[in-house]
Structures are given as C-alpha cells and as structure tokens.
Image (tube, rainbow, N blue to C red):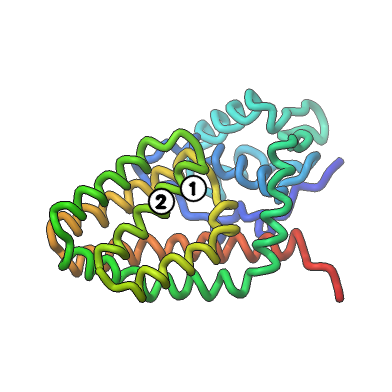
Amino acid sequence: MPEPVGLSVSGLSPRAVALPPPEVDANRYVADLVRREIRLGLLPPGSALPSEREFAEMLGVGRTPVQLAFRQLRSEGLIEQRRGRGGGAFVRGASEDESRFHGVISEAVRNRDEIRLAMEYRCLVEPAVARLASERRTAAELTALQSAHDQLRESPDDASFMRSDAVFHLTLAHITANPFLVRGIEESRQCCHPALALLPEGGTFHEATIAEHDEILAAVRGREPAEAERAMRAHVERSMWSVQKLLATLRERHPEPSA
C-alpha cells in the first residue's frame, strides 16, 4: 500500500498554505491546492492523499468542502477513489500537460537564489512604486491602469493572466516616470518568471490576485499614497511567501544533480 505523501514536503500543511479567505468557496480552494501539487509533480502518480478528515483539519474547513473538491478532481481524472482496506484517494497517472512543466521546474530550482533576491527586491521597491504612482498619475494613466486590470479580470487562461498581471505592475512603474524603477521592475519580474509560472493557475489563487489589485487600483485612483503602498506591500509579500514555499518544496522533490 503506498504511504501518504508527507504533507510538510508536498506543501499541503498549514505552514505551507494560507487558509482560504472567508469569501472564497472552500471546496474550490481545496481542489486548486491538490491540482497544483499534481501539476508540479509534488504528488506523483500513486500518491495517497490525506483522508477527508485529515485534510479538513489541516485547512480548518469542514469535511463537506473536501468531499466536493475530491469529487471535482475525480471528474477531471486527476485522482481515483479505492475501496476496502488500504483504500482512499490516490493520484492517477500524469498527463502530457503536467509533464511539460518539468523544464520550468528545473529552471526554477537552478535559479532559486536569484529568484529569491528578485522577490526581495520587489518587496522593497514595488510598495514605493505604488506610492509614487498614486501621487503622480494622470487621468490618462489611470485609464491605462484600469484597462490592464480589466484585462486581468477577463483573462481566458493562465498565460493571459500572467501577461496581464505583468502589464499591471509595469504600468504602475511607468506612471512614476522613473526609468530606473521601470527597468528594475522589468528585470526582477523576468527573473521571477519561472517560479511565478509554477504557482497555481485559475481558481481561488487568481481571485486573490485580482482582489489585491483591486485595492491597489482603488488607492491609486483615490490618490492615497499610504494605502497604495500598504496594499502593494501585502500583495508582493504574499507572492514572495508563496514563491519561497514553492522553491523549498521543489528543492526537496527535485534536487540538483551532484557535480
């Protein structure tokens, strides 16, 4: 019987994931988490998932959302339910779509130190960028920022979402009219791209990003520098936390070959 994957390694422990926001459907949140672990190869084929009770306790939700999440994942062909002794929920075989991320995973592991420094840079600089943007924006620039946010909301897939996310942050940088800030934001995002591309796609994770961008946009619109700085700091720090957890997990599951 396969042993359950260690949750502190796979990234499904309370220390590795934030609890779902109260306005988010808990069952969708759970499904997104498991889908991400499978997509990254952190829950390989044959892995046993925690029981519904254990999952509910780890995430601080009821068993019903977990049951609904497992049902959705079974309908997608990602997990299967086995009956009898040694039964439970198990990960099914990986698809070609999941396998295509192996190269991105290797790149993220290989460049993890640079990615960490780039995320640190973003946490220090982007709150100041948001503050300046709220002070300096013109009506035309605010319209451009609103357009970038609208594109983010309407993104049909993960690639479009990432592109619109980048446009939003770069638009803020351009509003400062400081070419050094623009260049720094561009370079730091390029460095972080492999890790950002591996974060969960769709679902509640995109909703959290949209909600955080909503707050930043509202502060820039209202010319509230302190609020714009606070909202951006919360946004990039959450992103950095997610990237750090991801890289730590990937390093354990995909160690670099010895020299």
Count of numbered badges drawn on the protein: 2
Above or below — where is 219 with respect to 181?
A: above
Q: Residues within 10 Å of mark 2 (few under 14, many from 20)?
A: many
Q: Secondary structure at mark 1?
A: loop
Residue 179 vs residue 15, the one in the foreground = 179
Residue 156: x percent and y percent? 45, 33
Task: Residue at 47%, 48% (x, y): give it.
Answer: 162
What amino acid type is highlighted by mark number 1?
Answer: Gly
Q: Which mark is residue 165?
A: 2
Residue 38 vs residue 59, the one in the foreground = 38
Disc 1: which residue: 60
Q: Secondary structure at mark 2?
A: helix
Query: In the figure, residue 169 lies in which quadrant?
Result: bottom left
Which is more N-terminal, label 1 or label 2? 1
The quarter of the rendered structure image containing the C terminus is bottom right
Residue 135: x percent and y percent? 16, 67
Residue 241 vs residue 175, the one in the foreground = 175
What amino acid type is highlighted by mark number 2?
Answer: Asp
Relative to 174, 68 lies left or right: right
Residue 213 vs residue 246, the one in the foreground = 213
Residue 57: x percent and y percent? 55, 47
